[in-house]
Image (cartoon, rainbow, N blue to C red):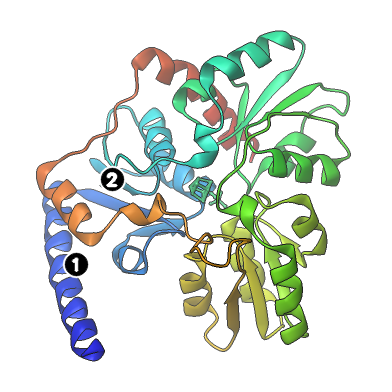
Amino acid sequence: MESKKSTSDALRNRQLADEIAALKKEKNAVIMAHYYQRDEIKEIADFIGDSLALARKAAETDADVIVMCGVHFMGETAKILCPDRTVLIPAPEAGCSLADSCDPEEFGKFVNEHPDHTVISYVNTSAAVKALTDIVVTSGNARKIVESLPADEKIIFGPDHNLGEYINSVTGRNMLLWNGACHVHDRFSLQGIADLKKEHPGSKVLVHPECRRPLQIIADKVGSTAALLDFARKDDAREYIVVTESGILFDMQRECPGKTFIPAPAEDAECQCNECDYMKMITLEKLRDCLREGKPEIHVDPEVAKKALRPIERMLELS
Ligand code: 13P
Ligand code: SF4
């Protein structure tokens, strides 16, 4: 019964993939996907990457249409970088708990209270927050960008508190941190990871810097999704405990077929908390419909976009 269902699912996915390929050609579109997307989306994407790579790729594409298979702020970033292109997002309701933890009005007040500080914002923010920012960073370049600033520069860093603590620890800075977090990365279980480590003594622990400080401290490698994948590719261990959204396991397994990747458990063992429900909102059907109908399209208020462009460009220049 189960195998009949998976055969029909595979057939359906193949049909959808064919329709998507034809539409993509007709519209001169490029499909970009974040590592946390569903496996079947990544199988047909033209480009898979972390937030930094997606922003870079968007900035240099010559396609007429960019379909962003990611969360809303990723579509906004692409639109701000490419205002003359059509940027589509198959599930516009795909938000981000971390971006939501930084209300632009509240953040604006915080910034105004510290007028002598340079404002650095993580890319997981709304366009309105980016417009209040001096330099945008991703987890892939935050350390490099902070280190490029003079040692005595006063810095506000938002919204991810855990990433901010990590950057403070590796750079010796004392950045003022906004208290935001991602509901997926903030809930991994230290005890659960310690138990897994006992069961797999030769394994290495790969941790995204949005995870809490104790997890960063026990990690063999802390890095962005792309950096963790790259580490797994080059390292010589056979087993890895992966402490980030579980979508990356597909890419790790595909690129390192002889190795074993074990998803880290969340504190609430009952829930699938190591999955980002926002990222999983995009399905092949929604992607096909979005290409066929040319919507939903991302729009950013031109005034906000103008202000948000400069800090994103500074990130691309500095990284
Ligand atoms: P990366 O920058 O590592 O792709 O992470 C983005 C993200 O949303 C992490 O939760
Ligand atoms: Fe946002 Fe967290 Fe999902 Fe990343 S995993 S998109 S930070 S909610």
**Picture residue at 52% right of the left edge, 85% below the top:** 257
Q: Nearer the viewer, residue 254 or 157?
A: 157
Q: Secondary structure at mark 2?
A: loop
In the image, 209 versus 153, the foreground residue is: 209
Residue 210, above or below 252: above
Pinpoint residue 102: horizontal percent, then vertical percent: 56, 28
Q: Position of residue 89 (x, y in %)?
A: 28, 43
Q: Residue at x 41, y 54 (%)?
A: 277
Q: Which residue is mark 1?
A: 17
Quadrant holding the N terminus: bottom left
Image-based side of 159 in relation to 18, left or right: right
Q: Earlier in the sequence, mark 1 or mark 2?
A: 1
Three-letter amino acid code at the position of disc 2: Ala
Mark 1 vs mark 2: give the one in front. Answer: 2
Alpha carbon separation for disc pair 1 and 2: 18 Å
Q: Which quadrant would residue 172 be assigned to in this image?
A: top right
In the picture, residue 3 is in which quadrant? bottom left
Figure quadrant of the C terminus: top right
Give the side of residue 277 with respect to residue 310, left or right: left
- Three-letter amino acid code at disc 1? Ala
Q: Is residue 164 left or right of residue 50?
A: right
In the displayed structure, does residue 308 sit left or right of residue 82?
right
Q: Which residue is mark 2?
A: 91
Residue 118 location (% of width, % of height): 72, 20
Q: Which residue shows up at 66% across the image and 74% down it?
A: 241
Query: Is residue 96 positioned above or below 275 on the image?
Result: above
- Whether residue 200 is visible here, answered yes or no, is no
Q: Is the Cβ of the residue at disc 1 closer than 8 Å to that at disc 2?
A: no
